[in-house]
Amino acid sequence: MNAVIRPLRSSRPQGPLVGAVRVPGDKSISHRALMFGALAVGETRIYGLLEGEDVLCTAAAMRALGAEISQGADGVWRVAGRGVGGLIEPGNVLDMGNSGTAARLLAGIIATHDIFAVMTGDGSLRTRPMKRVTDPLAQSGARFWSREGGRLPLAIKGARDPLPIEYELPVASAQVKSAILLAGLNAPGETLVREPAATRDHSENMLRHFGAVVDVERVGLGRVIRLQGQPELRAADVRVPADPSSAAFPMVAALLVPGSRIVLEHVGLNELRTGLFTCLREMGALIEVVSPRLEGGEEVGDLVVTAGVLRAVDVPAERAPSMIDEYPVLAVAAACAEGVSRFRGLHELRVKESDRLSATAALLAANGVKVEIEGDDLIVHGVAGGPPGGGLVATHMDHRLAMSALVLGLGSQRPVAVDDGSFIETSFPGFVALMNGLGAAIS
Ligand code: S3P
């Protein structure tokens, strides 16, 4: 995968961005739909699955673990599950590509199956910390062997007689929470996770959708989640909303290009994902929600985004879990806004697909924007009317850095180039065509 390097560049378009588009399906929900479908009894149908490389890695891994997964000519994915505890030992190493979510959630599933599995990934994933999941998962009786620092490749011997886990998350991470809940599916009794701050709850919503008993109690800013082990998960249809983390790119682009007005259809509006929209509105952005509705336990709606003048924002650390993937593109909006923005408490950005804190600062600096990192805070000095641009951005195998840089080019005085846009395929296949269809200039 990503064998071919794809340099890209973007520049100010001649006219405004206009049109109505649906960005690809939600990545978090797509991974989970395949995994829960594989653990359910019967056939799960998935509508609107993200067919990006990250999710295709999950599909391949679940097949290797014994699920039957096919993509119909109608675009609907069908998963014939093996039931909780029914997965089989894979005959080869599982390649999780670029995806931390796939690797960590799958580690949870394997931990409570009496099988041996080895997992690896690409150059980015092999640098990312796995101890955050293997430490709690070891409570189930599973054993793990990894490279120094808990990095992939990772070998797992799942527990023969799994125990339920009780764990307080040291960092707000939906991936760690979900890994523990997935392990809890095949352990007797109650699995309990305490999170210090609420993180995306797609696993909890989907577990209920498949028939599991999940109890969620709010405690201050955080939550306590209890799962009753060894449920019989029943196959269920899943309709995947458009990914708010992908909608973020055309959204910020439309805000920056004067005169633009676009509609983003069927976007997931789970309140634990929409911190970016809150920030942009605080900056003065006009983002209207049209016809909000509930689908499969998740809120969705159409968003109408209209260009306008943006001013600086001060983003509190508590908001980070609800917009953890959106800081690079918010930094781009801040670079084009009036005044100095501050984003607080970004330590978790250092362990994403790249060290996104330094890489976002470097992305802006390369294009003439003054930026500072103070502790875990990012400070961006906006240039109303658009920064100079003209830089070449190093994307470090990180799809969101690549797309953020290309959005910056649409609002900058000179074009912005990226060294490699091939990783955009992990989460947003068709990004360049979709953006250019709205009127962007990316080539
Ligand atoms: C995800 C959770 C987040 C996010 C990632 C997807 C998920 O990671 O950055 O892109 O699907 O659970 P953390 O939970 O590690 O913050």
Image (spheres, grey):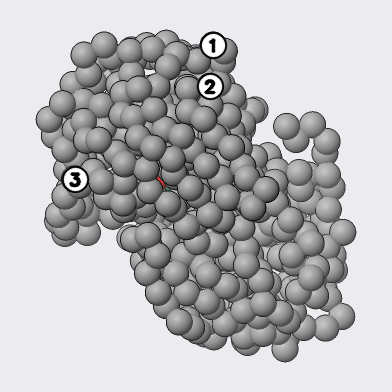
Query: Mark 3 sits on what residue?
Result: 213
Q: Residue at x 22, y 54 (%)?
A: 222
Q: Residues within 10 Å of mark 2 (few under 14, many from 20)?
A: some
Q: Is mark 3 on a helix, strand or loop?
A: loop
Label number found at residue 277: none
The residue carrying mark 1 is 91
Nearer the observer, 118 or 404: 118
Q: Are marks 3 and 1 in contact (CB under 8 Å)?
A: no
Residue 427 horizontal/vertical position (percent)? 62, 49
The span from disc 3 to disc 2 (Cα, nearest Å) is 28 Å
Three-letter code for the amino acid on which mark 1 is drawn: Gly
Tell me which label, 3 or 2, sits earlier in the chain.
2
Q: Which of marks 2 and 1 is nearer the N terminus?
A: 2
Which secondary structure lies at badge 2? Answer: helix
Residue at left offset 79%, top offset 70%: 437
Q: Are marks 2 and 1 in contact (CB under 8 Å)?
A: yes
- Measured as percent of width and height from the top left, residue 390 is found at 84, 62
Given residues 310 and 206, the one toward you in this image is 206
Q: Tag 1's secondary structure? A: loop
Name the mark on residue 64.
2
